[in-house]
């Protein structure tokens, strides 16, 4: 049975806050070693230097799956600029964003590239000085090398070359790579996926262009693909005025800042709910899970509700249980495709513990489990969803998710004293 | 000076969790009195009954601004079905979603309506029984009555009628209505705005249709507006096959679940950061704010980072300060336009306290303030942004946001002992 990777060890922050609240729980997919230096994403002088620096690492993805290391299990397989150059061209950042927009043609396919950040602890790296500060580190990019459109042949050739060296792309959901690499992949995957899901402007329906190192999609005022279409974008032109056919109809996103231009992250609540006496945990299961497998309840936060309200609403909807006080525990990025898991601990109201699956029929079952049974299952019954339980697991016993899941971390905290006034263990 | 409304009093949840962590802080715009019964949104039999029940309340919005009560300051002005019927027709839920989609024409304007939920504590309400459970309460809807397209005249007439009775729409940012009404308005505003910003499918660029009581926009496979266009949506048709011109090109969102079909909420971090000694608070100010006005730092969470990481990144970017342990405090829905404010408390690392505004030049200033100075400003120097400070405020003293802002609640917690092992007050 493959062991799931351990989550990133909690960072050691010696402070009053950590002495009072305990160490921070760093969940899998968080703990990125990169400084994103997001304020440099619009600076093509920087991106251009970063792209071609000898220290720069490229994470290649094919259909959103990352390239793996040829020999080190659990590691990503980064490549150098020369390897991806045939796919992305010598320097997509050679001109400014404004110049790129001025000659943009929506029918030209450009492989998606994401600037992920710089590793400031790398042995060697780029040194970049702007007007205010100096930034040093090894730059990281992600590149979509899915064989497609004008780069189909180049991508196929690149992939063949990698395969000849023993490198291949991950298959299935990536949950077993080393924590730092997992955080880098999470950033790459979520941004590549967001760009792929949003080629059109939700406000006006026209094609959009990826800018800001892949962190923004803008709705340009012109598109060379319109030349010869016989239609100008402006709604009224005098008969005498020359008509620029490449001009597009107006769009509200060009007038100010609109969230539809920026990457989307969906806040999700996931909660370990204790009973009022503080000795039982509410867990539920979905039909498609293996027998005896349970986890904490979870669901998307809705517009205009606090996380505390979302926790209470979801637990009521899915299990009919009424939750009182809610405390937020820790959070986990979840790039399948764009979730932010907000982990909480809640406690049922004294009269609200009766389980009712009849509101939103999402769960196959929900039950109260004694802390002792959960403790034992955390010891012997955890594994990935498609994997076997451990050797000490006895058939019929409770099965739970692995340590890479925030659900697991929430359960560990609750059965170890998070709810009670005095820690029990 | 108008006093900002008090935030909703913290709910009284007597439990081990509340004794250990203290009472829950319920921020302004949370604390909705409605049960959203989201699992009934697709059920047009329910929506149709809810629409026409005598207990039902309609919140009218014009350009996203809510109707106010004619005589009670700080209250919304709800109306009855007969008032809005000329705008929205007798019953937009008379047929099923499937039947509505089958005859949908993207050029027909339908005023946006949102099903907000039911008030189960209302004196009288609808009783609705489905296969599993019975739900009772006064239904709430929001309706966009902005005069526009085919309902321009009907909306203008409706608004004239209301004005004749002394009712009018709020102006400016709504921050001074009673807490329960504010939470209902937040839900209405965020959903109306999301529908208005997303009339097109980001995946394929075609017009979309609002369904599920306003909580989903679907990309229908057919559109009667295409009849007579001479183009069928399918890419290949044999010469002999009859061509259905109303069929649209394929879209990936129709094959599975895609987040672009659902309302968007942008997670935002806002944080009170203490120094390592635990006696100073980091506050910053924007250029457009009045003199001496400061608040906590804040910014959007980015894709694939935990909230704890987002707090550390934002504080580094905006103020150059390095934050260690982060604890999440409480959250606040913020419907301008779609934010979820995740309030956190952080503590700077011992060597990370030097302020540097040179990374992301977003702030006009950032400074460390003694807890004592913050405590005094919370007593005499708080107000809404456009308002005067209180009578005890002395010119030149620190000014801070009002109690309706989560920034204010975070500061109150920190200067009252959240960071230190023993509460100071």
Image (spheres, coloured by chain):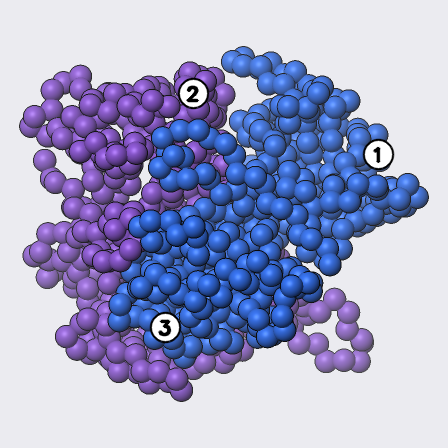
Chain colours: A blue, B purple
Q: Which image quadrant is residue A274 in?
A: bottom left
Q: Residues within 10 Å of mark 2 (few under 14, many from 20)?
A: some
Q: Chain of mark 1?
A: A
The residue positioned 81% from the left and 38% from the top of the image is A87
Q: Is residue B128 left or right of residue A146?
A: left
Residue A303 in view here: no
According to the picture, the residue beneath numbered tag 1 turns out to be A83
Q: Is residue A286 left or right of residue A297?
A: right
The residue positioned 21% from the left and 51% from the top of the image is B10
According to the picture, the residue beneath numbered tag 3 turns out to be A320
Helix, strand or loop at label 1? It is helix
Is tag 1's residue or tag 3's residue first in the polypeptide sequence?
1
Up/down of A332 relative to B419, above or below: below
Q: Is residue B275 left or right of residue B78?
A: right
Helix, strand or loop at label 2? It is loop
- Which mark identifies residue B350? 2
Mark pair 2, 1: CA separation:
43 Å
Mark pair 1, 3: CA separation:
55 Å
Mark pair 2, 3: CA separation:
47 Å
Give how far across and how far down residue B236 sits, in percent.
77, 69
Give how far across and how far down residue A3 sits, in percent.
69, 53
The residue positioned 19% from the left and 28% from the top of the image is B375
């Amino acid at each position: 049975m493959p062991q799931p990777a351990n989550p990133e060890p909690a960072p050691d922050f010696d402070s009053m806050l950590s002495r009072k609240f305990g160490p921070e729980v760093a969940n899998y997919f968080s703990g990125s070693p990169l400084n994103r230096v997001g304020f440099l994403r619009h600076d093509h002088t920087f991106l251009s230097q970063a792209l071609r620096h000898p220290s720069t690492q490229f994470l290649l993805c094919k259909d959103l799956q990352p390239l793996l290391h040829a020999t080190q299990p659990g590691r990503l397989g980064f490549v150098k600029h020369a390897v991806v150059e045939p796919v992305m061209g010598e320097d997509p950042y050679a001109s400014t964003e404004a110049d790129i927009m001025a000659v943009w043609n929506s029918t030209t396919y450009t492989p998606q590239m994401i600037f992920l950040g710089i590793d400031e602890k790398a042995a060697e790296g780029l040194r970049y000085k702007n007007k205010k500060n100096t930034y040093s580190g090894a730059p990281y990019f992600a590149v979509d090398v899915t064989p497609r459109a004008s780069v189909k042949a180049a991508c196929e050739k690149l992939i063949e070359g990698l395969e000849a060296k023993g490198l291949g792309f991950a298959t299935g959901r990536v949950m077993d790579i080393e924590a730092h690499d997992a955080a880098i992949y999470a950033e790459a995957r979520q941004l590549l996926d967001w760009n792929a899901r949003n080629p059109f402007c939700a406000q006006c329906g026209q094609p959009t262009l990826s800018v800001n190192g892949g962190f923004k999609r803008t709705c340009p005022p012109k598109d060379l693909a319109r030349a010869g279409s016989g239609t100008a974008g402006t709604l009224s032109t005098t008969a005498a005025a020359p008509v620029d056919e490449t001009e597009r109809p107006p769009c509200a996103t060009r007038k100010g800042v609109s969230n539809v231009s920026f990457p989307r992250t969906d806040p999700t609540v996931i909660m370990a709910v204790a009973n009022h006496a503080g000795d039982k945990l509410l867990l539920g299961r979905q039909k498609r899970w293996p027998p005896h497998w349970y986890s904490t309840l979870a669901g998307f936060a809705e517009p205009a509700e606090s996380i505390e309200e979302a926790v209470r609403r979801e637990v009521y909807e899915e299990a009919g249980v009424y939750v009182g006080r809610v405390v937020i525990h820790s959070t986990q990025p979840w790039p399948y495709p764009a979730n932010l898991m907000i982990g909480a601990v809640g406690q049922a109201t004294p009269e609200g513990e009766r389980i009712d699956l009849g509101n939103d029929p999402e769960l196959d079952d929900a039950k109260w489990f004694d802390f002792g049974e959960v403790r034992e299952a955390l010891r012997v019954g955890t594994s990935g969803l498609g994997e076997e339980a451990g050797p000490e697991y006895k058939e019929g016993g409770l099965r739970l998710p692995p340590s890479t899941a925030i659900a697991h971390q929430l359960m560990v905290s609750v059965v170890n004293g998070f709810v009670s006034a005095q820690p029990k263990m």
